[in-house]
Image: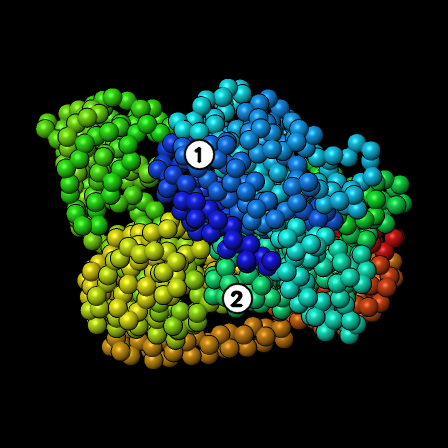
Amino acid sequence: MTTQQLRELFVQYFVDRGHLAQPSAPLVLHDDPTSLFTSAGMQPYMSAFRGETKPPASKVTSIQRCLRTNDIEGVGFHNRYATFFEMLGNFSFGDYFKEGAIEMAWDLMTNVLRLPTEHLYVTVYTDDDEAERIWHEHIGVPMDRISRLGRSDNWWPKERWEGPCGPCSEIHLDLGPEFGCDRPDCAVGCDCDRYLELWNLVFQMYTEAEDGTLTPLPKPGIDTGMGLERLALVMQGVRHLGETDEMAHIARRITDVISDQSGTELRYGQHGRSDLALRIIADHIRAAVFTQAGGVVPSNEGAGYVLRRFIRRSYRYGRQLGATEPFLHRVVPAVTEAMGQHHRELAEREEFSSELVRREEERFASTLRQGMGLFERVVGELEQEQTDAIPGEKAFTLYDTYGFPVELTVELAAERGLQVDMEGFQEAMEAQRVRSGMGSAGLAGARQELSLAQVPATEFVGYDHGSSQARVVALIADDELVEMAKAEQEVAVVLDQTPFYAEQGGQVGDSGSIQMAGAELAVRNTTKRGDKTLHIAVLKRGSVQVGDEVSATVDSRRRHAVMRNHTGTHLLHAALRQVLGEHVSQSGSLVAPDRLRFDFTHHEAVSTEQLTEIERLCNQWILDDRPVQAEDRDYEDAMRDGAIAIFTEKYDKQVRTISTEGVSTELCGGTHVSRTAQIGSFHIVDESSVAAGIRRIEALTGMGAAEHHRHLADQVHALAVALGSPPEQIGDRVAQLRDQISDLNRRLEKASSSGAAMVDVPSLLESATDVAGVHLISAHVPEVDRKLLGQLADQLATQLSPAVVLLGSAVDDKVALVCKADKAALAAGAHAGKLVSEAARSCDGGGGGRPDFAEGAGRDGGKLDQALAGAEVILRQQLGG
């Protein structure tokens, strides 16, 4: 059974049993301070388990993209570890509980997948009598195949955190003694590869305080997770995750590419060491492709650091297999071929992904040899010193200068039996930083905000109405729920329904007013907390309390400006894809009333000609007065019809699409104009780089664009007046002035050069002194620039040998110094760089350079003669005299 068939079978099994199939939430968590990546299937539903948001249905199933790096060292070595993986899950929000979850899991395992019951084992939490009873009495699992394990194995998550948690029950498959460790006590829970955990059934029952206090959830729930790759391993009868059908396809492409480069045939199964490397590379390139599909580019922090580590670690293993040049980018299409049927975004991002990986490979290749040279020198020093720990500052140099992720240095050191001083490394970094995926530890770092579980959800009516009647259902002041607020107090107001759009998807929150008899609130911003809308406001007069009937009104002028800019971003996105290519996708945005900002994937600066065409297209569509239509649709149907989605966003089964006739259709929950002509006009004001592979365009629409054009016209007029030319001839006038300036500079340089003839060269030659057999000229040449000093030094040094020439000049109290040493002086031990450095320091400055030629500068011209006089002592020390 193929991996894709397993995906379809799992989802269909639970859909047939009343579950709503939900698309995967984003893999990369751009705005989550506690986690870099989604690392568990239940993570998108945490607020629903807490009771803070309404779940999409009482029973849900999904295949969630996940990433963890806490087991990266075991990838390839053990049969069960992967960095990127897909979590098959079914969830119950107050519907079925332990018995229902256990029944369906066992039925799917034994009756549908036909796994042999005699090889299946289950575990329960140490005091979960109920789960044990269900397994034994209701399902019929013998007691000798049921184990009770503690918190580290059968409580989720095992780390204490302020989130949904509870005991769990796991289903394990005995793969056979050939996978085992041969220890007599080997059993379920052993860390060898024999007993493979397939499915974890979590009974979400509590939230847990820092002191361990358990508080029951409003409704107990079920959260299950089964690794798709592990299930494929079992169903396909292979030994490693890397040998399953999709991973094997990727591995075959790796062997093809490396064989092509090395000229030697490489194939999986030849040798254990090369097989290990192939499994690691296949895992990492797959993880890299999905990570960058989530909007990540290589960098030295956060998710970008993880992506960089995947690529660079893979590249090093590829070199060990015989790769002679960047090769990973040629493997990227294989990931799409293997997994693109289910993950459609991979095909859309393939070209961009390949180029991004290629550039990162080339960047690393250019520094790898130098970095390895430093590493080998460090190892040599340790051998001489008979120590076994690489100093932290050396590891930091490898990281900072040569782009070695510190984990790579640790791996290289381990191969030599060495350690790395990680404490010293962190000190060199000057601060602790999160450098890898959070895994479950990231979840454990979360902190629960003020619970609004008992507050009713807010209904949004703002697509069709700018004002509405509403009722106050909650007031929050100083992060506490209060019953009343008084004048001048800042308060967050929750209404049962609202026309105010809450900040999300790049669009800023609405502002406006909330009024009632005798009181008025000025709403400054609107935000979301789960399914509640928080109106951040100041009470201007009177008082407000929970239960009050109010009138909520949006600032319509500001809202319409935001709408123009939001629809403008959709036009810009479409124009970018038309002009630059289909690889362009949104990587971030800001939609404000006064401007719009759009970040997108592209590997090079957008040319002036391209920007002109992009702007022209947007304005043409505006002039066409095309209709803009919003429609609620099924997610899968919308995607099949070509709607553009942002893969960093989480979408429900039902989505809202914004279609601009003949231009584009995007999944978007924001507010928009109804026809493009309402935008008025569109003007690009800036294009810049945000990060490697990410560009940014800032633009204006409506009156903002008109005012900007007026401002530019005023500047052109003022410039024309200053230049004394008509506006249409400014370019010619500037070119004329540029030519005049160039001519004046040439004359000035000629005049300066002629000044060299006025310098008394014979007198300078006669001033030379003998210092240990080397001629030294150390002289002050008044009112001469650095370039002329260099010419004089060269001229003097050619007439004396061996010779060292140190010349200085002071103009407006600023010192210029040059020093020249000929080959004979160098052989005697002279060093121009060190000599000029000392002289410049004496003038309150600095300098340095090569042994044969160097320059310096100083801030105190009054000390120049003293500095020049000291040259003889310095040179004598260099010559050993």
Residue at 72%, 52% (x, y): give it: 239
Q: Nearer the viewer, mark 1 or mark 2?
A: 1
Q: Position of residue 164 (x, y in %)?
A: 48, 31
Q: Position of residue 540 (x, y in %)?
A: 18, 30
Between 588 and 550, the residue placed more toward the observer is: 550
Can residue 136 be seen in this snapshot? Answer: yes
Residue at 43%, 71% (x, y): give it: 580
> Which label is found at residue 104?
none
Give the residue type that dot 2 points to: Glu
Name the quarter where the N terminus is drawn: bottom right
Q: Position of residue 131 (x, y in %)?
A: 56, 28
Residue neighbourhood size for the residue with mark 1, other residues' Cα within 10 Å, grouped as few (<14), some (14–19), many (≥20): some
Q: Is residue 523 left or right of residue 143?
A: left
Residue at 60%, 36% (x, y): give it: 170
Between 20 and 443, the residue placed more toward the observer is: 20
Q: Position of residue 88 (x, y in %)?
A: 53, 47
Q: Is residue 788 left or right of residue 263?
A: left
Give the residue type that dot 1 points to: Tyr
Between 711 and 278, the residue placed more toward the observer is: 278
Residue neighbourhood size for the residue with mark 2, other residues' Cα within 10 Å, grouped as few (<14), some (14–19), many (≥20): many
Residue 393, image quadrant: top right
Residue that label 1 marks: 96
**Label 2's element?**
helix
**Label 1's element?**
loop
Residue at the left extreme? 517
Query: On screen, 440 above or below 255?
Result: above
Q: Is residue 823 left or right of residue 216?
A: right
Residue at 16%, 46% (x, y): give it: 466
Can residue 403 be seen in this snapshot? Answer: no
Mark 1 vs mark 2, CA separation in Å: 41 Å
Residue that label 2 marks: 350
